[in-house]
Amino acid sequence: MTDDAVVAAAKRGDPEAWRTLYREHAGRLVVWLRTRPTGDTACAAEDVASEAWTVAAQKIADFEGSSSEFGGWLFGIARRIAATTRRTSERRRTQPEDVGSYDLEATDSTLEVDGQDWVRTALASLPPRERAAVGLVDGLGLDARTAAEVLGTTAVAVRVARHRGLRRLAREVGAAAPDGPVVLGRTAPGM
């Protein structure tokens, strides 16, 4: 596979290419990290995202693909960093201190999910694998193949977990949604 123009420019260190990649993936990455079961504050999600971008910049030469495939690669990096951070925190039995609430200016429409507490509560009721699949595919709009890359599994496993999660949400949350019915299971690319 060959790189698309944005990835090739990012490999050459073009700041505009990095801005393009950042605009495309940064908001979704932070929102996704905030749904991860870490028990940490929102600040920790931003820290993990920041570290993931740093690792991506250091290892961009190893990546081959398009700017949309870059998202799956970046999310995979973030997943591994979050897991390492969680294991370190559990081993040390420490939690980062909440230093306040950060008000992100939403430039990406996917950040609207952040203000909907009922969505977060509904997703939290799912088992971790189902929560991840529904969050990545239905929440962030990734296709099953990219979500599988992010989660380190197969596209079939993502589709099965998503199906089970949506079915469980329809049973458990359908009646609890504010202001009308819940629309679950929109058709996502690659599903």
Image: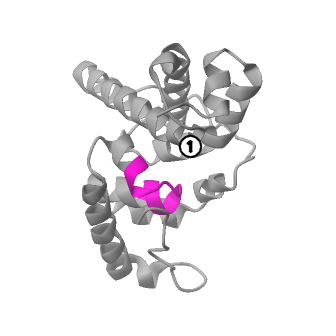
> Of helix, strand and loop, which one carries label 1?
helix
**Foreground of the two, 19 or 124:** 19
Task: From this view, report whether residue 147 is shown above or below residue 170.
Answer: above
**Foreground of the two, 101 or 164:** 164
Percent of width and height locating residue 7: 61, 29
**Foreground of the two, 14 or 31:** 14
Task: From this view, report whether residue 168 is shown above or below residue 55.
Answer: below
Please indicate whether residue 105 sits to the left or right of residue 126 in the image.
right
Residue at image location 49% in from the left, 46% down from the top: 32
Percent of width and height locating residue 155: 31, 54
**Foreground of the two, 105 or 138:** 138
- Magenta stretch: residue 142 in it? yes
Amino acid type, label 1: Ser
Please indicate whether residue 18 sits to the left or right of residue 128 in the image.
right
Residue at image location 48% in from the left, 28% down from the top: 64
Residue at image location 45% in from the left, 54% down from the top: 136
Residue range highlighted in magenta: 135-146
Quarter of the image that includes the C terminus: bottom left
Which residue has dot 1 on it? 68
Percent of width and height locating residue 96: 44, 25
Q: Residues within 10 Å of mark 1 (few under 14, many from 20)?
A: some
